[in-house]
Amino acid sequence: YYIKKYYFKGKLIKGVHETKEGASSNLILRKSAVLKVGGYTDSLDLGECSILCNSLRKEGYTVLYAKNVVVYNRKRPLFWPYLSRLFNQAMNRAMITKYDFSFYNLIFLMPSIFVLFILTGIFFSFYHSYIIIMYSSFISFYIFIVASLSIKKSFNQSVLIFSGTILSHFFYGFGIIAGLFRNQRLNNSIKIN
């Protein structure tokens, strides 16, 4: 297949490809382009970079991802600060999906479908033995996959990864659901000097 090649001052840039959006913790932007699209939105705590990148692409700009650019940032400690941020991030992602719907954004709704399946499965499994078997098989398979991917040399680290993964899935899924029902309007405002 054909891959676009990107050049800077006549030299081929390796490890660069076009993308739909980038994380604001690692965005390098041309000020004139950001001003042209109205800047960042001030309606969101997290995820404002998605709206900005989408606005830039609509204006004809290209958003690139460079895998060789490294940014060091501080991760949030487990569990509550991380899960709280994840919930808010998911809630904002759902609001962005409502604001600017595309099939690309549907992939972000998958955790909410998973959470709804888990919750409704508990309820419906009381009605028929076949549903109990299918539901418990799915839950067992899910736990097996998460557990096998959590195995590390340290038992404590494995337990943290296992529980953190499951909690992450649920917090992100509930965040998406909360964001879909949240009634907040998104707007753009320039925050650039």
Image (tube, rainbow, N blue to C red):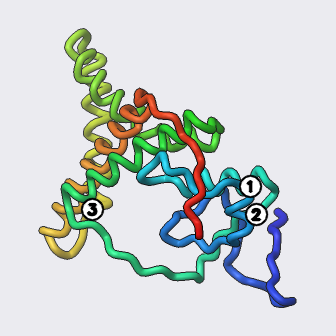
The residue at 82%/90% (across/down) is 11
Answer whether labels 1 and 2 touch (C-beta < 8 Å): yes
Verify CB contact (< 8 Å) between mark 2 and mark 3: no
Hey, which residue is sitting farthest top in the picture? 127
Residue 5, percent from left and from top: 82, 75
Residue located 27% across and 58% down the image: 82
Residue at (59%, 77%) from the top-left corner? Answer: 67
- In the structure shown, which secondary structural element does the residue marked by tag 3 occupy? helix
Q: Mark 2, residues whose alpha carbon is within 10 Å: few (<14), some, or many (≥20)?
A: some
Answer above or below: position of 74 versus 111: below
Q: Quadrant of residue 128?
A: top left
Q: Position of residue 25 (x, y in %)?
A: 48, 69
- Report x, y in % for residue 40: 57, 56
Choose mark 2 or mark 3, whichever is in front.
2
- Three-letter amino acid code at the position of disc 2: Thr
| Mark-to-mark CA distance, 3 and 1 | 38 Å
Please identify the quadrant where the C terminus is shown.
bottom right
Q: Name the amino acid type tagged 1.
A: Arg
- Quadrant in the rendering for residue 157: bottom left
Q: Position of residue 26 (x, y in %)?
A: 53, 72
Please name the residue that numbered disc 1 is placed on. Answer: 57
Q: Is residue 59 above or below residue 142?
A: below
**Judging from the image, what secondary structure is the residue with disc 2 in?**
loop
Mark 3 and mark 1 in contact? Answer it, CB < 8 Å: no
Q: Which residue is mark 2?
A: 62
Numbered mark located on residue 150 in the image? 3
Q: CA distance from mark 2 to mark 3?
A: 37 Å
Q: Is residue 50 visible?
A: no
